[in-house]
Image: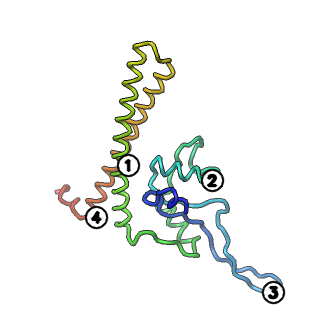
Amino acid sequence: MRAESMDMQDFIYRVVIPEEKVVEVKDGVSKEKVKKMFPGYILVEMVMSDEAWYVVRNTPGVTGFIGSSGKGAKPTPLQPYEVDKILNEYCTSGVPQVFKSNDELRLKCIQNNLRLLEFERENVQTARENHEIACDRNLLGNLAGIEMREAQKGLLDAEERILAAEYDTKICEISLLLISGKILDYLE
């Protein structure tokens, strides 16, 4: 699997092809076949990190995504009830379960979000250093305006990503409190 070869199994959990078993009768002989319910489409359960998104969208044979405007924009995820409906109605061939429970999945997500938050902190630090260098070069007249704007944009993008990572980590922290039952301590 590509997720394993790219060392992304902590971010890409499973890939499902919605299919069902159908019985076809041909020349009086009934034959059971597996039919793809949405030919050309798959479901991917993953943490939407920049690295995982890069691996998925650059997989050979992948041409586009529903809910994405294209040009590398991340798609809108399906709602849990939509996924449940597809898996329950159309996946009769058996969907492999990677995790034993939702709690185990939540814990894995929390670990991944904490790791992602650390990467984003390092990324912001690098962007700040690049911006400082660009400012110094600009004062010396050794920097074109477009290069200065690129450094500014890089810093703003990094700061935006760390805010999103901090938000996701806080949501995961709440999930962890729910799992452990300690959320009640905060409500009292």
Please tell me whether residue 25 is drawn above or below residue 124 in the rendered image. Answer: below
Nearer to us in this view, 92 or 114: 114
Give the side of residue 108 with respect to residue 33, left or right. left
Type of amino acid at the residue the image marks with label 4? Ile
> What residue is shown with label 2?
62
Corner quadrant of residue 180: bottom left
Q: Are marks 4 and 3 in contact (CB under 8 Å)?
A: no
Q: Earlier in the sequence, mark 3 or mark 2?
A: 3
Q: Earlier in the sequence, mark 4 or mark 3?
A: 3
Give the alpha-carbon distance from disc 1 to disc 3, as whole Å: 58 Å
Q: Quadrant of the C terminus?
A: bottom left
Give the side of residue 176 with respect to residue 30, left or right. left
Residue 175: percent from left, percent from top: 31, 58
> What residue is shown with label 1?
116
Please tell me whether residue 8 is drawn above or below residue 152 in the rendered image. Answer: below
Nearer to us in this view, 51 or 186: 51
Type of amino acid at the residue the image marks with label 1? Leu
Q: Earlier in the sequence, mark 2 or mark 1?
A: 2
